[in-house]
């Protein structure tokens, strides 16, 4: 594959990503206007907090904040016997220092029962730092899962994925 092919592919992927992102964020931008579109994190966090009362865990609360909210709610509901740690260093599974940190770690009796990464960018799963973290989990036998903040990681999907990697 030549350099022009790589450049063309990168330009095409960027264009497609921006169209998809515009479509996904379009309803919020149309309602709130361009001036109010910048503080999306506060708006997403407020939406996530309001769903705690209604029980709605849909993709409407997307992005990293939405995935974090759903994960933490599921941890409390289904994994109350586990200690939840945030920003777990890769050294817990013997990964190199330059490996990706884990977003969450579920611990039982001081040992990692599962490690989770929330990916924010397309293609991160192919990067060396993510691969190192994933491979270290595999070598040590620690269950691993990743969730992509730009995909609809709804409540049922997350529950099924966690049950798949952590049976019982």
Image (cartoon, grey):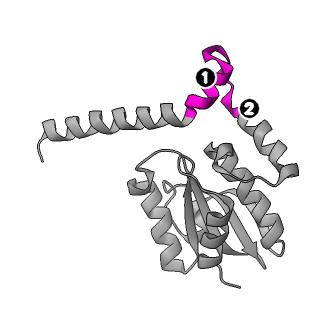
Relative to 134, residue 164 above or below: below
- The answer to whether the residue labelled 2 contacts the one labelled 1, judged by CB atoms less than 8 Å apart, is no
Looking at the rendering, which quadrant does residue 163 occupy? bottom right
Residue occupied by mark 2: 43
The disc placed on residue 150 is none
Q: Position of residue 31 (x, y in %)?
A: 66, 23
Question: In the visual, does 64 lie left or right of 73?
Answer: left
Q: Find the magenta span and give its range.
A: 25-42
Q: Position of residue 28 (x, y in %)?
A: 64, 29
Q: Residue at x 61, y 65 (%)?
A: 157
Looking at the rendering, which quadrant does residue 158 occupy? bottom right
Residue occupied by mark 1: 30
Q: Position of residue 150 (x, y in %)?
A: 53, 46
Single out the residue that lies furthest toward the bottom.
168
Evaluate whether residue 38 shows in this view: no
Tag 2's secondary structure? Answer: helix
Single out the residue that lies furthest toward the left.
2
Which of 110 and 42 lies nearest the eye of the viewer? 42
Q: Which circle, 2 or 1, is nearer the viewer?
A: 1
Which of 128 and 46 lies nearest the eye of the viewer? 46
Tag 1's secondary structure? Answer: helix
Taking the magenta stretch, the answer to whether it contains residue 36 is yes
Question: In the visual, does 94 lie left or right of 14?
Answer: right
Relative to 84, residue 13 above or below: above
Q: Residue at x 85, y 51 (%)?
A: 54
Q: CA distance from mark 2 to mark 1?
A: 14 Å
Q: Residue at x 68, y 65 (%)?
A: 105
Relative to 143, residue 39 above or below: above
Which of 112 and 162 lies nearest the eye of the viewer? 162
Question: In the visual, does 27 lie left or right of 18?
Answer: right
């Amino acid at each position: 594959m030549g350099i022009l092919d790589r450049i063309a592919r990168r330009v095409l992927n960027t264009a497609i990503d921006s169209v998809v992102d515009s479509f996904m964020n379009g309803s919020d931008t149309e309602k709130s206007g361009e001036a109010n579109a910048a503080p999306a994190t506060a708006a997403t966090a407020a939406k996530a907090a309001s769903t705690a009362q209604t029980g709605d865990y849909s993709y409407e609360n997307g992005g990293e904040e939405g995935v974090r909210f759903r994960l933490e709610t599921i941890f409390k509901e289904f994994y109350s016997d586990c200690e939840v740690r945030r920003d777990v260093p890769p050294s817990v599974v013997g990964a190199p220092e330059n490996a990706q940190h884990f977003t969450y770690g579920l611990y039982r009796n001081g040992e990692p029962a599962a490690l989770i990464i929330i990916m924010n960018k397309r293609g991160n799963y192919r990067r060396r730092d993510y691969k190192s973290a994933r491979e270290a989990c595999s070598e040590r036998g620690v269950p691993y899962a990743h969730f992509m903040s730009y995909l609809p990681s709804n409540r049922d999907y997350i529950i099924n994925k966690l049950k798949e990697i952590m049976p019982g």
